[in-house]
Amino acid sequence: MSSAARVTIHPSQFPAAVRHDLLESLRARQVNHKFHYDSFKQTQKWLALHEAFSPSRTDADCAAIYDLAFMAAAGGLTRPPFI
């Protein structure tokens, strides 16, 4: 069995496109959301912020809505989505 995996990278993530997006963010003085997760350290900080303030983590009613939505979506599956 081969251990190779096929990986596809969207053209928006090619180096020239990422550089363009970064320059546009700097010009607009608004950071594109994808750059919030540019490093492991940044990712950890944003996830901690999410855990502390996201209603899905701080409001039981909000969390319950997510649970119900996921159960409803899963109930509509008639076969495994991945083969």
Image (cartoon, rainbow, N blue to C red):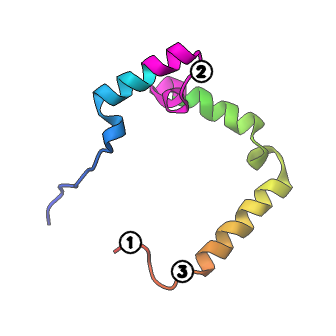
The prevailing secondary structure element of the residues shown in magenta is helix
Assess whether mark 3 and mark 2 are in contact (beta carbons under 8 angstroms). Answer: no
Identify the residue position indicated by label 2 in the image. 30
For disc 3, the neighbor class at 10 Å (few under 14, some 14 to 19, many from 20) is few
Identify the residue position indicated by label 3 in the image. 77
Identify the residue position indicated by label 1 in the image. 82
* Picture quadrant of residue 53: top right
Q: Residue at x 81, y 44 (%)?
A: 58
Alpha carbon separation for disc pair 1 and 3: 11 Å
Sequence order check, earlier mark of 1 and 3: 3
For the magenta stretch, what is the residue range? 23-42
Quarter the C terminus occupies: bottom left
Alpha carbon separation for disc pair 2 and 3: 40 Å
* 2 relative to 42 in the view: left or right: left
For disc 2, the neighbor class at 10 Å (few under 14, some 14 to 19, many from 20) is few
Quarter the N terminus occupies: bottom left
The amino acid marked with disc number 2 is Gln
* 28 relative to 65 in the view: left or right: left
Return the residue nearer the eye: 45 or 79: 79
